Image: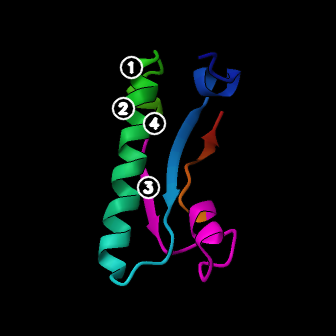
Amino acid sequence: MILPFALWNATTEPTSPSSQATNPEASFKLSQKRAENTMQELVRLGVDAKRLETKGYGEKFPVANNSTEEGGQMNQRIDLRVTSK
């Protein structure tokens, strides 16, 4: 896997929204774990852990309607946000 230049030269935050769940706390925990797993993989690929921090957002920031299976799947994602250069 070739990592984008920004990951090598910027502080990056793997974030993970989640689809709507019956339990908001469980949704948050799932999204936080997904973000942490992404960070671990980026470190394994050579990104300095000091340049990374994670944030789970639970049900916040959906990109699709959670009332459909397709929409829920779209909301189970990882976003990488550059927080400083």
Q: Which mark is residue 67?
A: none
Q: Which residue is mark 2?
A: 40
* The N terminus sits in image quarter: top right
Amino acid on which the number 3 mark rests in the picture: Lys
Does the magenta portion include 54? yes
Say what secondary structure mark 2 lies in: helix
Residue 62, percent from left and from top: 62, 71
Q: Which residue is mark 1?
A: 44
Amino acid on which the number 2 mark rests in the picture: Gln
**Cβ atoms at labels 2 and 4 below 8 Å apart:** no
Q: Quadrant of residue 29?
A: bottom left
Near mark 3 (Cα within 10 A), the count class, few <14, some 14-19 or many ≥20, is some
Q: Earlier in the sequence, mark 2 or mark 4?
A: 2
Amino acid on which the number 4 mark rests in the picture: Leu
Toward the front, the furthest residue is 69
Q: Nearer the viewer, mark 1 or mark 3?
A: 1
Q: What residue is shown at x 55% (from left), y 35% (from top)?
A: 11
**Cβ atoms at labels 1 and 2 below 8 Å apart:** yes
Q: How far, Cα to Cα, is label 4 from label 1?
A: 12 Å
In the image, which residues are magenta? 53-74
Q: Nearer the viewer, mark 2 or mark 4?
A: 2
Q: How far, Cα to Cα, is label 1 from label 3?
A: 19 Å
Say what secondary structure mark 3 lies in: strand
Q: Which residue is mark 3?
A: 55
Q: Nearer the viewer, mark 2 or mark 3?
A: 2
Near mark 4 (Cα within 10 A), the count class, few <14, some 14-19 or many ≥20, is many
Q: How far, Cα to Cα, is label 2 from label 3?
A: 13 Å
Say what secondary structure mark 4 lies in: loop
Q: What residue is shown at x 60% (from left), y 83% (from top)?
A: 67
Q: Earlier in the sequence, mark 1 or mark 3?
A: 1
Q: Which mark is residue 52?
A: 4
**Cβ atoms at labels 2 and 3 below 8 Å apart:** no
